[in-house]
Amino acid sequence: MAHLVIAGHGWQRNKTFDPGATGYIKKGEHKYVVEDLFPAIKKQLPKGHNVIFYHEKKVSNYGNLVQLARQFKAKQVTEIHFDAHTLGSSARGGHVIIHKNFSPDKMDLALRDEIKNMVGVRYSHKGHEGISGRDNLYNVNQAAQNGITYRLIELGFGTNKLDADIMVNNVDDYARELVKAITGTAVTTKSSNTAKTVKKPQKQAKTNVKKGNLTVDGKWGKSTTRALQRALNTPVDGIISKQPRNNVTQSLYGGTVQFGNGGSNVVVALQRKLKVNADGKLGPATVRALQRYLGTPVDGVLSRPSVVVKELQRRLNAGTF
C-alpha cells in the first residue's frame, strides 16, 4: 500500500493557477512544495517505501481526492501546505489538520513531532498539541466520508521570517524530518545524494572532560568553540567551518563561523553526541537537540545572547558536557 503525498493548491478547473500562500517565500506554497520540498524528500527516501507524489491538479478544486487514493491504493494521504498571515507577523509554527471528530493516529503524531522539531507547533485537539480538528475543509470532509486516512500538514508561516528561512534554507533538514515520520526510518544524505538507513546509536555513557574557563555570557564565539572542540576531541582552532547561512550560524559571534559547503568536524561530533543526523551543518534541528539535552527551552533559535549557550558554557567550564 502507498502513501500519497499531495502538494496543496496548483492548477484549477478554470485553467488558472493558485499559488497558495506566499509571504517571504514568493513563489508560493505549491511551487515551494513541488520545486524544493518534493525533490529533497525524494532524494532521502529509503528503498522499499512506496511514496507517491502528486501535484498536477488542485485536488480540493477538482474534487479528485477519493479517486487518487483509490487509483494509487493509498493507505495514507498527506497534503502539504504552509500558512500565511500579514507579512512580518509574529505568528509562526506548524500543525497537523485532521477531521474534528477523529483523534490523531500514529502518523499524525509522528508528523506533528517532526514539524515541532523544525518550527514548533500551534493549536491543540483532543489534548494533543500541534493537532487541529476541522470540518470546514473539502478534502478533510471527503476523506472522512469515504474512509480515507488523511491529514493536511502546515509546515509553518511563510509570512514569518524565521519559519520561512527554515523552510527555504533548511529544506533538506525539513525533508529529512518528514521522511522519518512517513517511513519510520531516520536517514542521512551523503554528498552523492543517495540515502542510507541510520542504525540506532548505542547508548553512550556521560563522561567528564577537561574544564574550561569561559565567561558565561551566552555568546557563542571562538572561545566557546575552542572549549567545545576540546571537549569533543576534535581539532582546536575556534572555527566552525563550511557552514550554511541560516538564522543559527548568523547568530554566532566573533568570526567563529566560516560559511561554505561541506560541514564542520566539531558539529559532526556534537550531532553524534546529541544523537541526531550528523551532517556537520549547524541549524535549528541541532539547536533543538542541544536545547533538549541541556534542559533549556526548545525553539531551535540562538538568541544574542542565548540561554542554551550560557548552559553550554557552564557545562564546558564544569567539565560535564
Image (cartoon, rainbow, N blue to C red):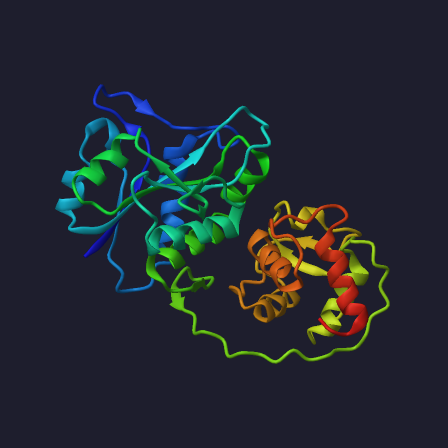
Q: Position of residue 38 (x, y in %)?
A: 36, 46
On screen, residue 20 versus residue 305, left or right, reads left
Q: Quadrant of residue 199?
A: bottom left
Residue 237 appearing in the image: no
Taking depth in this image into account, of 7 and 124 the one nearest to the observer is: 124
Classify residue 166 by image quadrant: top right
The quadrant in which the C terminus is found is bottom right
Depth check, front residue: 201 or 251: 201
Residue placed at 57% from the left, 70% from the top?
272
Query: Do we see residue 117 in this rendering?
Result: yes
Q: Is residue 112 above or below residue 316?
A: above
Specify whether 237 is left or right of 54: right
Q: Nearer the viewer, residue 245 or 307?
A: 307
Residue drawn at point x = 36 percent, y = 62 percent? 184
Counting from the top left corner in percent of width and height, residue 134 is at: 34, 34
> Residue 90: x and y, percent?
60, 32
Query: If the image is split into quadrants, where does the N terminus sit?
Result: bottom left
